[in-house]
Image: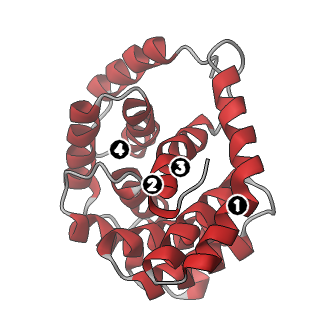
Amino acid sequence: RAGRWMEADADFTSALELLPEDSAMWHEYAYRFAFLLAYTQQSDRYRELCRQTLANFGDTDNHKLAERTAKMCLFSQDIAIDVEQAARLAVRDYADNDVPNWLVAWYEQSKGIAEYRRGNWAASIEALERSAGLSTRQSIGALTSQLYLAMAYHRAGQHEKARGLYQSLELSLDSAEQELSQAKSGQAASNWNDYMALHLVRPEAVALIGGN
């Protein structure tokens, strides 16, 4: 959490080598490590970790592991896994009382991202709107859902709506970028991986929608 990413890389690598591959703790390390690998532009290692995680947890019934596996494999456009297999983890229907309340916003976010990568714009919009509405306002979770939502609006032909939403997010996105940059020399937030995801997805949104 001190922003020393290369030291963190070594620690994550060692942990994954020591832990049982089918354990929840292995998945916890793999999930966070995936964003670090993508952020430090280690595409081959990121893709391989996604493939390994999907192989280990592609059939999981655990809600948290399912949504996180889908998210880590699909959050970036740099995808080298079976999109449908990863997406199925996020879009499975659960009874409302079968999903813990704290997980619903994140579950809907993963579902929205999965549907976006599948090209199902209407389904993506529905899930991301719900996620943004359930998230704490101005939280990193809400900001992430809204960024993908702006892209989904654009893909669905709602260009003005997409542009307006993106413009409303720019100050918050700039603030998140600044916080991630400061982490390189100081204390990183406990959810540093979410900030990395925003950093990596923002250029995709800019290229699609336009912006700074």
- The Cα atoms of the two marked residues, 4 and 3, are separated by 32 Å
- Residue 107 x, y percent position in the rendering: 53, 69
Disc number at residue 202? 3
Q: Secondary structure at mark 4?
A: loop
**Alpha-carbon neighbours of circle 4 within 10 Å: few (<14), some, or many (≥20)?**
few
Q: Is residue 29 above or below residue 133?
A: above
As rendered, which of 198 and 154 lies closer to the eye?
154
Closest to the camera, between mark 4 and mark 2, is 2
Residue lying at the far right in this picture: please name it: 137
**Alpha-carbon neighbours of circle 2 within 10 Å: few (<14), some, or many (≥20)?**
few
The earlier-in-sequence mark between 4 and 2 is 4
- Which residue carries the number 1 mark? 167
- Residue 165 x, y percent position in the rendering: 68, 69
Q: Secondary structure at mark 3?
A: helix
Three-letter code for the amino acid on which mark 2 is drawn: Ala
- The Cα atoms of the two marked residues, 2 and 1, are separated by 14 Å
- Which residue carries the number 4 mark? 23
- Residue 130 x, y percent position in the rendering: 64, 80
- Which residue carries the number 2 mark? 207
- The Cα atoms of the two marked residues, 3 and 2, are separated by 9 Å
Q: Is residue 97 above or below residue 52?
A: below
As rendered, which of 170 and 46 lies closer to the eye?
170
The earlier-in-sequence mark between 4 and 3 is 4
- The Cα atoms of the two marked residues, 4 and 1, are separated by 42 Å
Q: Residue at x 34, y 68 (%)?
A: 117
Q: Residue at x 42, y 17 (%)?
A: 11
On-image quarter of the N terminus? top right
**86 lies left or right of 65:** left
Three-letter code for the amino acid on which mark 4 is drawn: Ser
